[in-house]
Image: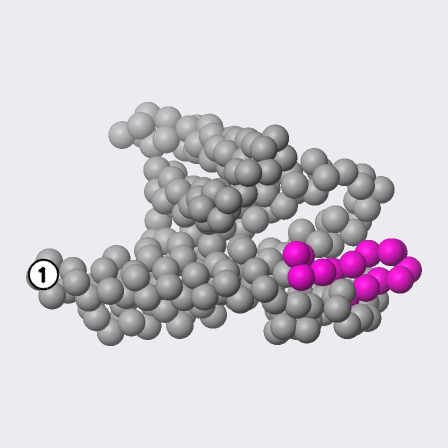
Amino acid sequence: MSRTLEWHRAGLCACALFAAFLIKSHYSHASAEDLRWILAPTTVLVEWMSGGSFEFESGSGYISKAHYFLIAPSCSGVNFLMTAFVMLSLKWIWTSPTKRFQILSLPVAAGIAFIATLVANSVRISLALAFQSLNSATFHRMEGILIYFSFLLLLFVLTERGFRIKRFFFPLLIYYACALGIPVLNGAWKQGLRFQEHALFVMIIPLLLITILQLASLPGKYAQTSRA
């Protein structure tokens, strides 16, 4: 690998991280009106999945009066969008053999991450609506982490040439960096026990999911070894 190509890749990785920073900055100050570009298509999918009906209310988001349910800015899935974009762009930039494909990685990653976010977030919201009777902060936290990380792994597998369980630690590190690293840098640790509880769920649930996938892949490995 030439030094020029290495610098080119490093520069594009920096651009991807800066784009993620801009997304996060926009989201942290955005109102429901500012986020209609993602809330509106998400709501359409939720209506299709759940059969419910939502109306936009200025300053709040999309409301289902029949179910007393609100799709607010905090439900937009922008954090997952940022995480998926970072994971895909960094992976493709660092593995693409030519500068042209490396540059194309940024817009392609953004488009795929946006579509994946709409699907993942719509599934999460639809399940939350279906299990609305379990109105527990712990349940919603666990559901969100499990669905988002599952979709992140699925996105990683679908964009990989082969199913390699060891590579799951790359999306895991990206997820930890976005779900924990950024909040810590923003001072979320000052919330004390509340953030510690959230961080514990974020740390454990993805590891459990990867462990389950690892155990599920063992029979196939044993079968290949016996045939060899």
Nearer to me, 219 or 45 = 45
Amino acid found under the numbered disc labelled 1: Arg
Instruction: Locate residue 85 relative to residue 148 in the image: left or right.
Output: left
Secondary structure under the numbered disc 1 in the rendered image: helix
The boundaries of the magenta stretch are 62-75
**Residue drawn 60% across the image and 46% down it:** 147
Figure check: 99 above or below 194: below
Nearer to me, 76 or 31 = 31
Instruction: Locate residue 205 relative to residue 59 in the image: left or right.
Output: left
* Farthest residue, direction left: 2
Q: Which residue is mark 1?
A: 3
Q: Position of residue 40 (x, y in %)?
A: 68, 71
In which quadrant of the rendered view does residue 87 lie? bottom left
Nearer to me, 212 or 120 = 120
Q: Position of residue 151 (x, y in %)?
A: 54, 50
Instruction: Locate residue 12 relative to residue 199 in the image: left or right.
Output: left
In which quadrant of the rendered view does residue 134 lie? top right
Queried whether the magenta region covers residue 65, the answer comes back as yes
**Residue drawn 56% across the image and 49% down it:** 148
